[in-house]
Image: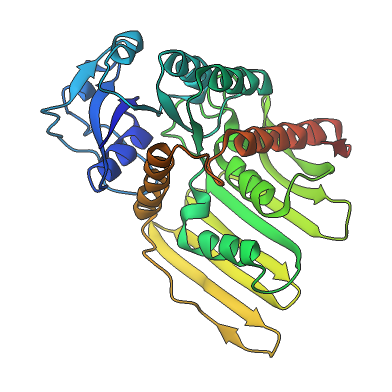
C-alpha cells in the first residue's frame, strides 16, 4: 500500500482525495492545510469547474497538519501530493524530496524555469521520483490520440490544431497574478503545450498573437514551428462572456486519418458538438468507443499511473518532470512572442 501525504485542500486537493478513495493500492494517510475549517472536514466552500460540489468529509484516520515540515517528518508517508497554488510548488517539492519522499505535484510544475531546475536538481540528489500532474493525456479522447501517435496507427503525424478557451474564472483568486497562478497561459494553455510537446516533440520556435491582461496573456493564438513541414497551432485563453465557461478540442492530422473532437459547456449544459471521430483514408467517419467522459475519472487514471510508477520505481512517460519543464518553456516563449510581436526561438 502506498501512503500519500496530501498538501493543499482546495478544489484540486479535493479531486485528488476523492480519487485516492477509489484507487486500489494507495491511500491518503496525512493532510496538510492552513485552513483549519477544511482540515476538520468542512469542504463545503470548495468550488471548481467540474466534478462534485464540496461537502462535509469524514477525515477520521487521517493525520492532519497545518505545517508542511511536521507532515514531512511522518515516516508513514511514501509520496507527497502537492495541490498548493503554483507559486508554492517549487519550495514544497524541494522540501518533500529532501525529506526522502516521492513527489507528485500538480501542474504547472512551477512559475519559472529557474524553479523547475531547482526541483529537478532536488530530485537527482534525493533519488526519488518527481511527477507533474498533467492530466490531459488521461482524458479518453486525448488518450486515444496519444496512443494512435505512439503506435503509428494512422501513419505519419502531419500536424494538429488544439483549442482550450474558458470564460473569466471570477471565482479563482489570483488567476491573473503572474507571481501566484500565472494566468491563462500557465493555468490553462499549459495542458495543450504539454500534449503538443508529448505528441510532436519540442518545436524550434513559436509565433503567437494575442491580447494581454496586465502582465499575462489573456487570449491568444500560437503556431509551433518544426524543422519539417508539420503544422501545429493552438488557440487558448479567456473570453469575457460567462455563457461558455469551458471548451476544448482538437483536429489532429495523420497521413492516413484525421481525428476530430470538440466539447463545451454552454449555458451550464455539456455540449459534445463533435464526439471523437476518425476520418479515414477511405472516406469513412467512425466514432470509437471510449471510456467514461467524466473528467474526475481521468484523474483516477492519472493517480493510478503515479501509484504504478512508485511501486515499480520507474519514471512516467507522461508525467515526467522534463516534459513538464518543456511545457513551461513553451508557455514562456509564447508569452514573449505576444509581447514582442516576433517569432521566438525555443
Quadrant into which the N terminus falls: top left
| Residue 244 seen anywhere in this rendered image of the structure | no
The location of residue 55, given as percent across then percent down, is: 18, 38
Q: Residue at x 42, y 46 (%)?
A: 305
Comparing 23 with 113, the one in front is: 23
In the rendered structure, the answer to whether residue 164 lies left or right of residue 40 reads right
Q: Where is residue 223 shown, x and y percent of the image? A: 79, 50
Q: Residue at x 62, y 89 (%)?
A: 284
Q: Is residue 203 above or below residue 271?
A: above
271 left or right of 190 in image: left
In the image, residue 262 above or below residue 243: below
Across and down, in percent, residue 92 comes to 45, 17
Q: Nearer the viewer, residue 140 or 120?
A: 120
Q: Position of residue 233 (x, y in %)?
A: 74, 54
Say which quarter of the image contains residue 35. Answer: top left
252 left or right, relative to 23: right
**Location of the C terminus (image quadrant):** top right
In the depicted structure, whether residue 57 falls above or below residue 158: above
Quadrant in the picture for residue 266: bottom left
Which color scheme did the rendering employ for the protein? rainbow
- Vertical relation: 85 (above or below) 160: above
Residue at image point 44% right, 76% down: 289
Amino acid at each position: 500500500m502506498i501512503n500519500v501525504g496530501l498538501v493543499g485542500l482546495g478544489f484540486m486537493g479535493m479531486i485528488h482525495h476523492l480519487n485516492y478513495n477509489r484507487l486500489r493500492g494507495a491511500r491518503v494517510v496525512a493532510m496538510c492545510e492552513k485552513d483549519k475549517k477544511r482540515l476538520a472536514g468542512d469542504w463545503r466552500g470548495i468550488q471548481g469547474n467540474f466534478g462534485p460540489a464540496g461537502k462535509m468529509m469524514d477525515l477520521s484516520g487521517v493525520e492532519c497538519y497545518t505545517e508542511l515540515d511536521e507532515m514531512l517528518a511522518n515516516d508513514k508517508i511514501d509520496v507527497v501530493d502537492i495541490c498548493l497554488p503554483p507559486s508554492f510548488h517549487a519550495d514544497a517539492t524541494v522540501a518533500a524530496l529532501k525529506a526522502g519522499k516521492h513527489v507528485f505535484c500538480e501542474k504547472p510544475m512551477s512559475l519559472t524555469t529557474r524553479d523547475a531546475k531547482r526541483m529537478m536538481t532536488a530530485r537527482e540528489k534525493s533519488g526519488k521520483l518527481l511527477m507533474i500532474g498533467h492530466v490531459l493525456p488521461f482524458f479518453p479522447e486525448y488518450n486515444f490520440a496519444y496512443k494512435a501517435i505512439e503506435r503509428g496507427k494512422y501513419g505519419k503525424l502531419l500536424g494538429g490544431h488544439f483549442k482550450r478557451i474558458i470564460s473569466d474564472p471570477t471565482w479563482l483568486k489570483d488567476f491573473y497574478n503572474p507571481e501566484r497562478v500565472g494566468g491563462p497561459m500557465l493555468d490553462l494553455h499549459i495542458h495543450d503545450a504539454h500534449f503538443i510537446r508529448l505528441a510532436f516533440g519540442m518545436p524550434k520556435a513559436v509565433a503567437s498573437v494575442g491580447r494581454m491582461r496586465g502582465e499575462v496573456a489573456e487570449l491568444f493564438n500560437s503556431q509551433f514551428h518544426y524543422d519539417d513541414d508539420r503544422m501545429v497551432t493552438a488557440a487558448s485563453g479567456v473570453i469575457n462572456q460567462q455563457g461558455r465557461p469551458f471548451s476544448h478540442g482538437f483536429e489532429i492530422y495523420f497521413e492516413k486519418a484525421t481525428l476530430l473532437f470538440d466539447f463545451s459547456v454552454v449555458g451550464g449544459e455539456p455540449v459534445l458538438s463533435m464526439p471523437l471521430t476518425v476520418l479515414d483514408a477511405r472516406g469513412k467517419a467512425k466514432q470509437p468507443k471510449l471510456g467514461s467522459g467524466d473528467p474526475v475519472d481521468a484523474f483516477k487514471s492519472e493517480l493510478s499511473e503515479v501509484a504504478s510508477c512508485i511501486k515499480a520505481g520507474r519514471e512516467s512517460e507522461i508525467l515526467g518532470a522534463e516534459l513538464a519543464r518543456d511545457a513551461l518553456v513553451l508557455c514562456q516563449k509564447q508569452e514573449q512572442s505576444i509581447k514582442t510581436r516576433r517569432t521566438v526561438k525555443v
